Image (cartoon, helix red, strand yellow):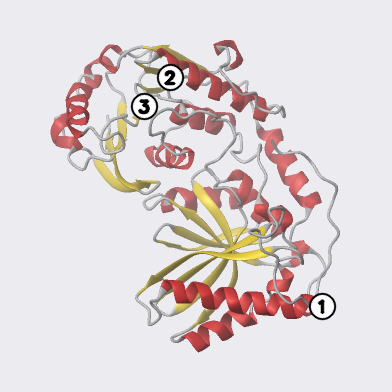
Amino acid sequence: MYKYKKPAVWHYDCSLCYTTPMEKTFTAVALCAVGAEKAVSNEIKKLASKGSALKVDDSLYGRVRFTTDICGLYQALIGLRAADRVLLEAGQFKAMDFDALFEGASCVEWEQLVPKGMGLKVAKVRVNRSQLKAETTIQSMVHKAAAQRLCEKYKMNRLPEPAVNTHVKVAEVRVYIEKDFVSLLLDLSGDPLFKRGYRSEGGAAPLRETTAASILLLSGWKRKFPLYDPFCGSGTILIEAAMYAWDMAPGLGRHFAIEDMLIADTQIEHRVRDEFRAKIDFTRLVRIAGSDDDLRTISIAQSNAARLRDIAEGRDPQHGIRSKNDAPGIELKAVPMKEAASPFADAGFILTNPPYGKRLGDQNAAEEIYKEMAGLSSRFPGWKIAVITDHSGFESFFGKKADFCKEISNGAIPSYFYEYNV
C-alpha cells in the first residue's frame, strides 16, 4: 500500500539548464499489449485534455511514445489503465556498430537519473531491422558504458551489486533498436503496472488487469450501460470496469521505481495522488454483474473487489476471503454460463474471457464452451458481446462471424478480441 514520504531534496548538475522539475520536458514510452496501443494513446490524450502536459508522439508495436513533464510522468504511472510499464527515454541515437553503441550510451547523463548507491541492470533488449543483432552483446555493451560513466561521476570503482548486497536497489534499463536507431529506456514503474494491489488470488490462468482494462476501453463500454461477465473468474474485468466507472486511478495503492530516481519530486507526486483520489465517486450508478460456476471463485472475486474499496478509501488492503458486503457495486453469483441471464432491465455489454483453451491445456473443452456461448444472444437480447480468447477459430464454434476482430496479447499469449455489435 502506498504511504506518503517526506519531500525529497533536489540536486542537479548545472549542465541540465533547468532549476525546477516542472521546467524539464521528458520523452517517455508506455509499454502495452500488442493491439492495445490505441487504448493507451486515447488514455494519454484524455489526461492531456484535462490540462496535463502530455502529448502523444507516435504509436509503435506495443509501445506509445509521448512527451511530458515530471507531473505528467506521475499522472501516467498512476492513471494509465492499459499500460504495462512507463519508461523514461534516457537517450536516443543512431548506431550501426558496437563502437557507436558504446559511445552513444556513454553520452547519456545517467548521473542525472540514477543516484549513487544504486545498481544498474540492462533488463531487456529488442532489435528490429538493424545492423546490430547480437542481443547479449548489446546488453553487455550498454551496461558497461552506463556503469563506466556512473563510476567516473561518483568516483567509484564499481557499481553496487544486489547479488552481494540484497538491500541494493537496481535501476532497470531496456534497449530498443529499430532501423539502427537506439532508444535507451529507464524503467519508472518497478513492478509491472498490472499489479494494482487488489488481487491477492487470481484463480486459474487469470487475465492481466491491464489486458482487461484494454478490452474494456476498446469495447466502447461506458458506465451508463450495464456490464455482465458470465465467466467472471477472479473478477478482473468487472473490477477494472468498476474502477473506470468510479473514476478511480489504478495506481493509487502502489509504489513506483521513479520514487528512487533523481528526477523524483515527492511533493508533485502527493499532489497528483490527491487529485486522482479526489475524483473517485462511489455515488455514481454502476450496473456491473458477473457469474461463475465455482462458488470459491466467486468468493475470490468478492474479496478482490473488497480490496479495491480498501485502496480507494486509503486503507491497507486486507488479505484473505472477504464478505460480499465489503464489495458494494458489483453483483456476483455462482451460476453456470448456460444459466446466466440479464439481471438488468435494459441492454448493455457482455465482456468476457472464457477460462478454457491453451491457457489451461484443454482445447476441446474450449470449443464446446464456445458452442454453448451462442445461447447468450437469446438470454441477453440486444446486448453487445465482446470476447477475448486464445482461439483463432472462435467464430466458427460460436456460430457467427464477429463484426470486429483484433489481435491482442495477454502476457506472452497471443489472443483475439471478438466483438458482436447489436
Q: Which of marks 1 and 2 is nearer the N terminus?
A: 1
Q: Which mark is residue 349?
A: 3
| Vertical placement of residue 35 versus 274, above or below | below
Q: Please, what secondary structure does the residue beneath circle 1 have?
A: helix
Residue bearing mark 1: 14
| Vertical placement of residue 30 versus 289, above or below | below
Residue bearing mark 2: 297
Please state which of the two labelled residues, at mark 3 or mark 1, is closer to the viewer: 1
Please state which of the two labelled residues, at mark 1 or mark 2, is closer to the viewer: 2
| Vertical placement of residue 286 versus 241, above or below | above
Q: Where is residue 289 in the image (x, y as percent from the top left)?
A: 44, 18
Where is the C terminus found, in terms of image quarters? Answer: top left
Viewer-proximal residue among 282 and 90: 90
**Res. 158 image quadrant:** bottom right
Q: Which of marks 3 and 1 is nearer the N terminus?
A: 1
Q: Which of marks 3 and 2 is nearer the N terminus?
A: 2
Viewer-proximal residue among 296 and 65: 296
In whole angstroms, how far apart are the C-alphas of marks 3 and 1?
A: 55 Å
Q: Position of residue 249 (x, y in %)?
A: 61, 38
Q: Is residue 78 left or right of residue 344?
A: right
In whole angstroms, how far apart are the C-alphas of marks 1 and 2?
A: 56 Å
How many neighbours does mark 3 have within 10 angstroms: few (below 14), some (14-19), or many (20 or more)? many
Q: Please, what secondary structure does the residue beneath circle 3 have?
A: strand
Please state which of the two labelled residues, at mark 3 or mark 2, is closer to the viewer: 2
Q: Do the residues labelled 3 and 1 touch (CB within 8 Å)?
A: no
The residue under label 2 is which amino acid type?
A: Thr
In whole angstroms, how far apart are the C-alphas of marks 3 and 2?
A: 22 Å
How many neighbours does mark 1 have within 10 angstroms: few (below 14), some (14-19), or many (20 or more)? few
The residue under label 1 is which amino acid type?
A: Cys
Can residue 51 be seen here? The reply is: no
Can residue 290 be seen here? The reply is: yes
